[in-house]
Image: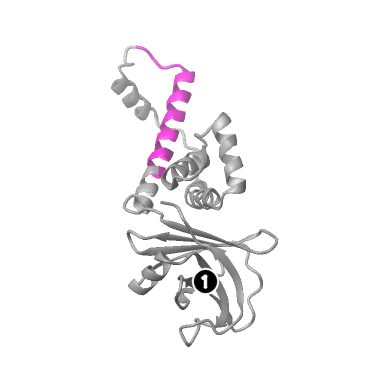
Amino acid sequence: MRPENPEVVDRLAAEYVLGTLRGRARRRFERWRATSPLVEERAAFWEDRLLGLAKGTKALTPPPHVWEGVRQRLGFVERAPRRGNLRVLALAASIAVVAILGGLLYWNTFGPQQLTQVASISAPSGTRVWTVQVFRKTARLTVRAGELPVTPAGRDYELWALPTGGAPVSLGVLPRSGSAQRTLTEVQQRALASAPQVAVSIEPTGGSPTGQPTGAIVFVAPLRSVT
């Protein structure tokens, strides 16, 4: 089995970050992450969104009436729960909350979408510089920045689709950190549909003034279909 189905990869990535992916499956996922740009991107996505939920949280001891309500719902009213039972219930409640939050985040982000193309733009050393994702159904493009080289003063990096038999089509200025999303125009969608590669050029701040690359092309990467 190889990590080719984007929906399966995304579900496994969420389980991996939550910690519910265990044993052999977890080790296999970690091997995939080391060799697959798609797996690395989805794991990084869920780390950004789920691990951030834990920041600043504090352990709380539920008040007695909460556990009394749980006991009544589970039919344990006639005997007091042992300390071990309380711990099990607390753990189960914590897992449920995290799972619900993860599910909501997954649905809000990917429920109506489907990843169709991905490009991993890397330096010659192998360091990931940007990851580009295309969601054709919703005409959206997302870019996640990695470890960028130093940007020349007064310049920006600009992303281009390289359609077969056509001129480069700008996909916008690339973020220097974090991630960015944008809605694709019809021209950009057509260019991406027939583009086997994307490229990055160095342009004046704000992007090329001509609609075509004016500076050096510093990166070229394959654009892979994942559907």
Magenta-colored span: 79-102
Outermost top residue: 78
Q: Residue at x 56, y 82 (%)?
A: 203
Could you tell me the amino acid type at mark 1?
A: Leu
* Residue 157 in the image: above or below residue 51: below
Outermost right residue: 125
* Residue 84 in the image: above or below residue 36: above
Q: Position of residue 26 (x, y in %)?
A: 56, 35
**Along the line of sight, the residue nearer the viewer: 104 or 109:** 109
Q: Is residue 173 left or right of residue 66?
A: right
State the colouring used for the structure image. Answer: one colour
Q: Residue at x 54, y 71 (%)?
A: 199
Query: What kind of element bears circle 1?
Result: loop
Q: Position of residue 179 (x, y in %)?
A: 49, 63
Q: Position of residue 180 (x, y in %)?
A: 46, 66
**Along the line of sight, the residue nearer the viewer: 189 or 26:** 189
* Residue 70 in the image: above or below residue 203: above
Residue wearing tag 1: 174
Residue 79's quadrant in the figure? top left
Q: Residue at x 56, y 72 (%)?
A: 200
Examine the structure image and report whether residue 89 is included in the region drawn in magenta: yes
Classify 10 Å Cα crowding around label 1: few (below 14), some (14-19), many (20 and above).
many
**Along the line of sight, the residue nearer the viewer: 121 or 90:** 121
Q: Position of residue 219 (x, y in %)?
A: 60, 70
Picture mark count: 1
Give the dominant element type of the magenta stretch: helix, strand or loop.
helix
Q: Residue at x 35, y 64 (%)?
A: 139
Residue 68's quadrant in the figure? top left
Outermost front residue: 165
